[in-house]
Amino acid sequence: MSSFKIGVLADIQYEDADDHKKCQYRQSLSKLDSAVKTLNSHELDFVVQLGDLVNKNLSSFSPVLERLEKLTAPTFHVLGNHDFIVEDLEKPTIPFVLNMPSRYYSFDQEGWRFIFLDGSDLSLNAYPENSHMYKISQKALDQVTSKSEWWNGALSETQMKWLAASLSDAELKQKKVAIFCHFPITPDSRFTLWNSDKVLELIQSYSSVKCWFSGHHHEGSYSFLEKKHFLTFKGMVESELPTFSTLEFKENEVVVTGYGNESDRVLTF
């Protein structure tokens, strides 16, 4: 296997609004400009945007997407909870605004399967309050026993079955798997998926899964559980620097290089 490199951006969370606590909403555009310039200096196969592209409002998307279009590598999006803080009639349009093939999807490259999950599949942000999906999401939240918050989300049973099928297929074809999701799933965090315990149990049953990459928790974190790496990237919206990373995939490791983000780290497997 030849090595290849990708870029990762997390929680850009732009809005034309004044700073709130540590969030510097307007400054995300200049930080993104700097990130795009540096990412374009690398030969990247693709870039992953890990969700919360905006803080709120449909009008916030255009300025950010205009900058992402300057990337020379293709961009793949993950849906975040803030991406759905728009008018009710606009909520179903967000995946189309981001030109996503589906709310969750995957593709294979160089012996790897890259899986992009929708952590807002069940969500109180992603659906109008009087909708059927909102009611199902509320029931899912009511059943949560782990530490989590209403502004997180969950994978539906349909998505869980899709994920299990994709992982089984990857295992059969002897592919390594990297999963991208806006939300972390490591235990004892208020930022995790509502059903993080079930998702964690599922992926731990497959040796093909090597990494879970997430955003959402702006401070970032890292865990190594049962031979799998769980890396949460720091949020650009809270950083004084243009926070982003490059990941170089090699035969038995992923080299993470941070630019104002997580310090350099080698994920071995």
Image (cartoon, rainbow, N blue to C red):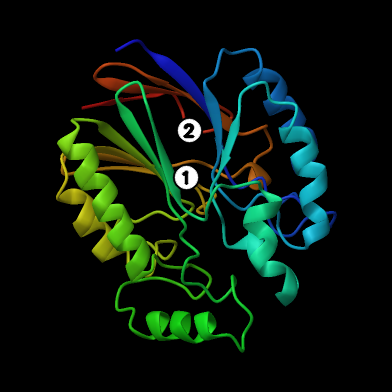
Q: Name the residue under label 1.
A: 220
Q: Mark 2 points at which residue?
A: 262
User: Disc 1 marks which amino acid?
Assistant: Gly
**Viewer-nearest residue: 34 or 133:** 133
Which quadrant: the C terminus? Answer: top left
In the figure, is residue 5 to the left or right of 229? right
Q: Position of residue 47 (x, y in %)?
A: 56, 30
- Label 1 secondary element: loop
User: Disc 2 marks which amino acid?
Assistant: Glu
- Label 2 secondary element: loop
Which quadrant: the N terminus? Answer: top left
Category of crowding for the residue at label 2, using alpha-carbon neighbours closer than 10 angstroms: few (below 14), some (14–19), many (at least 20) = many
Image height of 171 relative to 123, above or below: above
Q: How many labels does the image show?
A: 2
Q: Position of residue 119 (x, y in %)?
A: 46, 60
Q: Position of residue 91 (x, y in %)?
A: 67, 68
User: Which residue is at 47% across, 19% downward?
Assistant: 5
Q: Can residue 52 be seen in this view?
A: yes
Q: Position of residue 268 (x, y in %)?
A: 25, 25
**Viewer-nearest residue: 259 or 71:** 71
Image height of 197 relative to 12, above or below: below
User: Which residue is at 18% across, 30% downward?
Assistant: 174
User: Which residue is at 61% across, 23% downward?
Assistant: 73
Image quarter of residue 86: bottom right
Q: Can residue 208 be seen in this view?
A: no
Dot 1 or dot 2: first in sequence order is 1
In the figure, is residue 18 to the left or right of 203? right
Alpha carbon distance from label 1 to label 2: 7 Å
Residue 28 - label? none
Determine whether label 1 and label 2 are within 8 Å by CB: yes
Category of crowding for the residue at label 1, using alpha-carbon neighbours closer than 10 angstroms: few (below 14), some (14–19), many (at least 20) = some
